[in-house]
Image: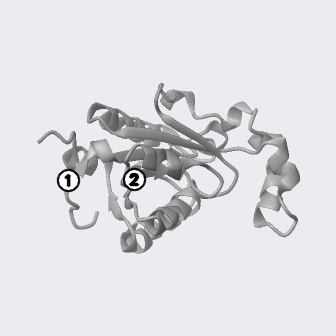
Amino acid sequence: MTDTPPAIDARHAALLVMDYQPGIISRLGDPETLIDRANQAIALVRRRGGHVGYVRVAFSDADYEGVPATSGMAALMAGAGDAFHADSPLTAVDPRMAPQDGDIVVRKSRVGAFSTTDLDEQLRAREVDTLILAGISTSGVVLSTVRDAYDRDYRVLVLADASADPDAEVHAFLTERVFPRQAQVLTVDDLVRLLSDGAA
């Protein structure tokens, strides 16, 4: 979708699958194709020796009690009720793409993947310098994580066809006009061609 980026060494790359959980996927009209593409990317990254991380949004009792009234999250959390409680099955990673042993799994309580998790520390410990993002929604977790990852000096790639937004026009605007300023925007098929296993 943009100029072709150089090859990606999978050993230093992580695919972040973000907010792929039943309570969010259910908001999309036809999620099956999206899930299939995300699973293709997951399988590819695993085969090439890369890292896979899962980010989910869910709130503990302490999160509900600790959010200040001035926070924009307060109204969202109140409106979500128990559906976004950390113990709810609606906040688990979708079982169609369940994590495997050794994968990174973090629970966040804000929009972006970094600010309320130890994700950055886990990625640095694995010597990851490149992030491949797939998430729901494009205007939520993907947008926030692109900006934060860019500021943390990661190389950022966004899988446009493994991300989605309830508003298709917003998805198109972000992937075509906004993200290319700070990330490479590509498809799962592009990733097949670009992702190297690092063998010399």
The answer to whether residue 169 shows anywhere in this view is no
Q: Residue at x 77, y 66 (%)?
A: 72
Which residue lies most toward the top here?
A: 101
- Residue at x 52% of width, y 43% of height: 30
Q: Residues within 10 Å of mark 1 (few under 14, many from 20)?
A: few
> Badge 2 is on which residue?
131
Amino acid type for the residue under numbered disc 2: Leu
| Quarter of the figure with residue 45 | top left
Q: Is residue 37 above or below residue 149?
A: above
The image's colour scheme reads one colour
State which quarter of the image contains the C terminus: top left
Q: Nearer the viewer, residue 186 or 32?
A: 186
Q: Dot 1 lies on which element?
A: loop
Residue that lies at the very extreme toward the front in this rendered image: 125
Q: Residue at x 47, y 69 (%)?
A: 151
At numbered mark 2, what does the secondary structure look like: helix, strand or loop?
Answer: strand
- Residue 33 in the image: state x and y as whole percent: 43, 40
Residue of label 1: 7
Whichever of labels 2 and 1 marks the residue nearer the N terminus, that label is 1
Left or right placement of residue 21 versus residue 71 in this view: left
Kind of residue sitting beneath label 1: Ala
Q: Could you tell me if the residues under marks 2 and 1 are in contact, i.e. CB atoms within 8 Å?
A: no
How many marks are shown on the rendered structure? 2
The picture places residue 70, in percent across and down from the top left corner, at 84, 70
Q: Residue 185 shows which numbered tag? A: none
Tell me which corner region of the image, top left, top right, bottom left or bottom right, holds residue 74. bottom right
Q: Position of residue 190 (x, y in %)?
A: 25, 51
